[in-house]
Image (spheres, rainbow, N blue to C red):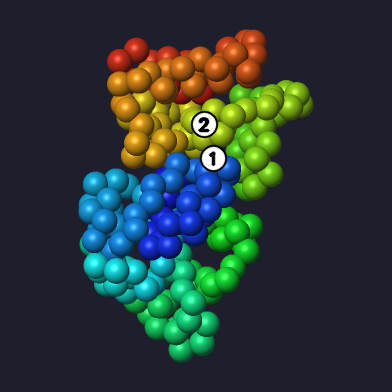
Amino acid sequence: MRVLVVEDEPLLAAAIAEWLRDDSHAVDVAGDGGAALERLSVNAYDVLVLDRDIPVVHGDEVCRQLVASGSATRVLMLTAAAAVTDRVEGLGLGADDYLTKPFAFAELAARVLALGRRSRPADPPVLRRAGVTLDPARHEVFRDGRYVPLSKKEFAVLVELLRADGATVSAEQLLEKAWDEHVDPFTGAVRLTILKLRRKLGEPGLVETVTGVGYRIP
């Protein structure tokens, strides 16, 4: 999934981003509300992890503007305010979930995954196609019963191909969902990752190239 983390404490922001990247999410980071709104206007994020008390534009206003825009991005609001009234207020602004600081990174990651499922048509708990079984929660892939060790990017790309349910996924779509904003679209990152994924999945080949369009698992 594509996730935007908005947190003005650099060490905490980096730690959250690293934890989520370990779960094969593409993560961008913003340190204030103004930068967050700019990124939200450009990129289609599945989940926004939003610290409520941030500079430039307050987190409440970021949430309010995002909801007003009709965006499908799900909002997980973070705050040090733990009172019930604070949680109710945050949810009233349009946030989908609310997590108080300090929090366990494992819980935050689980909540992000749950919200991501709600940002698109519901996926089954385990994705299956053409002999491939992928468990997003356990981060495991099997082909015909054989365990397939994948890198984070290979795993993220395979998720998108399986979610497409046989439809073709363009390289641009894969870049949008599996890489963060710092990727150079001309590096051939998608082509190289597909090549490695094909090699690891083994024969007979599963991932087809649709010339001029993208990739699919028929």
- Measured from the top left, where is residue 24 in percent x and y? 54, 40
Badge 2, how many Cα within 10 Å: few under 14, some, many 20+? many
- Secondary structure type for disc 1: loop
Q: Nearer the viewer, residue 161 or 175?
A: 175
Instruction: Identify the residue position indicated by label 2 in the image.
Output: 153
Residue 21: x percent and y percent?
52, 43
Q: Are marks 2 and 1 in contact (CB under 8 Å)?
A: yes
Tell me where residue 99 appears, x and y as whole percent: 52, 71
Q: Quadrant of residue 143?
A: top right
Seen as rendered, the residue at the extreme right is 145
Residue type for callout 2: Lys
From the top left corner, tell me how far across and down residue 207 is, in percent.
51, 18
Dot 2 falls on a residue whose secondary structure is helix
- Residue at 30% of width from left, 15% of height from top? 212
Residue in the picture at 51% in, 87% down: 83
For the point 61% across and 24% down, the residue is: 130
Rounded to the nearest angstrom, the CA distance separating label 2 from label 1 is: 6 Å
Number of disc labels: 2
Instruction: Identify the residue position indicated by label 1 in the image.
Output: 24
Which residue is rendered at x = 39% and y = 39% of the image?
180
Up the image or down, 28 lies above or below 103; here it is: above
Give above or below for 41 relative to 32. Answer: above
Which amino acid does the dot numbered 1 rest on?
A: Ser
Q: Give the vertical position of 146 relative to 90 (above or below).
A: above
| Residue 119 appears in the figure | no
